[in-house]
């Protein structure tokens, strides 16, 4: 008898346009994993509303992200693709775990510190922003996921999830699988083109900051040519903060090309300067995104097809999530309905 496939779950917020950071750090590996694992991939709209969202835009972005998932190679026959709010167990387990979540753990989260610092007044910071990692823990634990494919910035949230799961298991008996973070070797932390010491983010206002998966070729070329570098000439991988811009461009090139570091450096051994590097990074980005963009532009005109995939995905997700939630409710002492 064959052993059942291990389960993985991951999610992306529909809070803006997806960047090449989201693709290289998360989506690309989601596609690769769907052959081997039992996969659940969700569009986390409940997380998106931890900061203010325009309702019309949120609805549009949710469909846009679904279309990008499929255009990037996720196959609804192999992976359940769904919207978080369509599976009510997420919010329910989120509440139950909230009652177990120590405030001290939540205040320590870097993402909360960063995001709350951006919202000037305490009154305008929603409690959801603080509790964000608890809902993320609910997403993961509902599916008894053994691994969670994410970029490097989610490492701390994964640690929090493990701690919370262990706390629950300790108090109420073995209920949850303790998940591992699954972080790619290359592309786990793509930096901003204009701020190579800070992570590329979909919500950064500056035009020169991020390349979006749906950017037109000429826009990508323009952004890459404007990328911040340094006054040197060496085109080599480096941990030196001074060289962070060049290192980031080389990492993008490596992640898209699938080459080794040595092969990437060899490609630029005869370059005449950073201009050549930027052109090459722009071209490989344009060419890698081209087939996905073509597919996206077809899919986005078929909202009925996309909604059908999300409906089927939610049904598959519910079958697993509701079972875990029932066990949780029993273990904590809720009377059966
Ligand atoms: P989000 O929407 O910010 O990002 C989605 C995924 O993209 C990765 N990522 C990056 N990887 C490399 N370089 C970058 N510059 C970069 N920017 C983003 C993120 O690491 C992430 O994997 N909290 C999550 C969403 C979430 C989730 C979950 C993830 C909610 N529930 C359960 C996993 C499991 C987030 O904000 O992702």
Image (cartoon, rainbow, N blue to C red):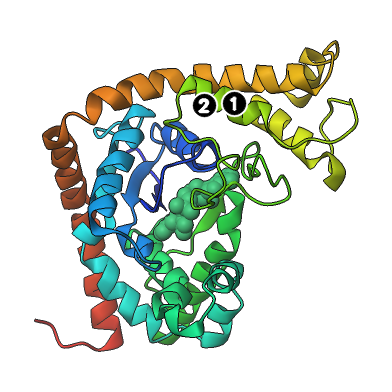
Quadrant of the image occupied by residue 171: bottom left
Give the camera-side residue of 97 and 56: 56
* Label 1 packing within 10 angstroms: few (<14), some (14-19), many (20+): some
Q: Determine whether 53 is above or below 193 in the image.
A: below
Secondary structure at badge 1 equals: helix
At horizontal 40% and vertical 40% (from top left) the residue drawn is 37
For the residue with label 2, is its CB less than 8 Å from the closest atom of ligand 1? no
Residue in the image at 32% along x and 38% along y? 1
| Occupied quadrant, residue 268 | top right
Position of residue 103 measured from the top left corner of the image (x, y, whole percent): 52, 86
Q: Which residue was labeled with disc 2?
A: 219
Question: Who is closer to the viewer here, 285 or 336?
Answer: 285
Marks 1 and 2 sit apart, C-alpha to C-alpha, by 5 Å
Q: Nearer the viewer, residue 234 or 307?
A: 234
Left or right: 16 as drawn, with respect to 182 = left
**Looking at the picture, how far across and down is residue 283, in whole percent?**
59, 16
Q: Image height check: is 179 above or below 97? A: above
228 vs 288, left or right, is right
| Residue at x 54%, y 26% (from the top left corner) | 220
Residue at the image point whose x is 64% and y is 44% from the top: 192
* Mark 1 vs 2: CB contact within 8 A: yes
Q: Position of residue 266 (x, y in %)?
A: 81, 15
Label 2 Cα neighbours within 10 Å, binned few <14 / some 14-19 / many ≥20: some
- Quadrant including the C terminus: bottom left
Task: Determine if the C-beta at disc 1 is less than 8 A from ligand 1.
Answer: no
The residue tagged 1 is: 222
């Amino acid at each position: 008898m064959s052993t059942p496939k291990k389960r993985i779950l991951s999610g992306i917020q529909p809070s803006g346009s997806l960047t090449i950071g989201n693709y290289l750090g998360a989506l690309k590996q989601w596609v690769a994993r769907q052959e081997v694992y039992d996969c659940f991939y969700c569009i986390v709209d409940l997380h998106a509303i931890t900061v203010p969202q325009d309702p019309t835009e949120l609805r549009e972005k949710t469909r846009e992200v679904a279309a990008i998932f499929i255009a990037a190679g996720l196959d609804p026959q192999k992976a359940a693709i769904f919207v978080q709010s369509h599976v009510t167990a997420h919010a329910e387990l989120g509440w139950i775990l909230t009652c177990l979540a120590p405030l001290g753990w939540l205040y320590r989260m870097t993402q909360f510190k960063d995001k709350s610092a951006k919202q000037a007044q305490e009154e305008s910071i929603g409690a959801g922003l603080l509790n964000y990692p608890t809902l993320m823990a609910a997403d993961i634990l509902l599916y008894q996921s053994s691994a969670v494919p994410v970029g490097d910035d989610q490492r701390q949230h994964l640690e929090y999830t493990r701690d919370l799961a262990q706390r629950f298991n300790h108090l109420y008996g073995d209920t949850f699988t303790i998940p591992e973070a699954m972080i790619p070797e290359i592309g786990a932390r793509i930096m901003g083109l204009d701020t190579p010491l800070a992570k590329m983010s979909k919500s950064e206002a500056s035009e020169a900051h991020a390349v979006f998966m749906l950017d037109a070729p000429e826009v990508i070329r323009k952004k890459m040519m404007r990328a911040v570098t340094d006054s040197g000439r060496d085109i080599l991988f480096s941990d030196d903060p001074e060289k962070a811009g060049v290192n980031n461009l080389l990492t993008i090139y490596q992640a898209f090309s699938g080459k080794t570091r040595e092969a990437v450096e060899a490609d630029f051994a005869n370059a005449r300067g950073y201009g050549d590097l930027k052109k090459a990074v722009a071209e490989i980005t344009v060419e890698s995104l081209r087939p996905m963009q073509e597919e996206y532009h077809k899919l986005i005109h078929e909202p009925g097809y996309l909604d059908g995939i999300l409906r089927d995905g939610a049904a598959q997700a519910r079958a697993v999530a509701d079972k875990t939630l029932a066990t949780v409710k029993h273990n904590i002492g809720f009377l059966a309905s």
